[in-house]
Amino acid sequence: MAQADVTILFALFPGVTQLDFTGPHQVFSRLPGATVKVASVTGADIEVDGFAISGLGRLADIPACDVLCVPGGAGTSAAMLDDAFMGEVRRLAAGAWFVTSVCTGSLVLGAAGLLRGRRAACHWAARDLLARFGAIPDAGRVVRDGNIITGGGVTAGIDFALTLAAEIAGDEVAQAIQLVLEYAPAPPFDAGRPETAPPEVLERVRRTMARPAADRLAAVETAAARL
């Protein structure tokens, strides 16, 4: 697809993980011809990770978008049960070329009934919950199934955004954006996935995630029962 003008919308909520949003936003903001919008239900500032995301629009005021992206974060548990937010996600997804997510944002897409029978990525700690919505959990860093493109946990959002940028504007444009951003990850540790992290590190992270995981499971079960 070679598209000169495309509207990309990030649908945010309180408790979003900022890098789920800011990583892809950095890529899309350099995509020629792209209009990148950021909105929430109320349009109020969202405080996250020590700073505020401001200048948000209201989702209800946006008639349509070409790309809908839902980031993840601890706030997805509440977002899945927010009728106003979920209603806007369903409305905007219905007319979008691509419906996308980063991290646990795919749980929101699942709760909206958009992932039945579709392969989808998610953060490793929540990936299995996608099955509750009839989705097929996929461990890929970026997963495409039709017009649904989902990224894995947090930093996978950059890979997702470059993948979509190539789809929209071609490989050369996407590679130029990657070069400008000097995106050439070379982490000091091979601990970015549970399969490669040292066992003691994995256990430590699982302990810290235990309470949020319980809350997320309860929200997923409630949201799945509503479908």
Image: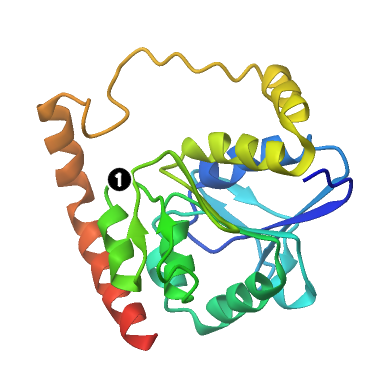
Left or right: where 41 falls relative to 155: right
Side of 24 where 1 appears, left or right: right
Residue 52 lies, in percent from the top left, at 61, 50
Q: Secondary structure at mark 1?
A: loop
Image height of 88 relative to 145, above or below:
below
Q: Is residue 107 left or right of residue 20?
A: left
**Residue of label 1:** 124
Near-viewer residue (99 or 11): 99
Task: Judge left or right: residue 117 versus residue 222.
Answer: right
Q: Is residue 99 above or below residue 27?
A: below
Compared with 112, 142 (above or below) is: above
Identity, as a three-letter code, of the amino acid under mark 1: Trp
Q: Residue at x 70, y 66 (%)?
A: 96
The C terminus: image quadrant:
bottom left
Q: Quadrant of residue 168?
A: top right
How many residues crowd around disc 1 within 10 Å: few (fewer than 14), some, or many (20 or more)? some
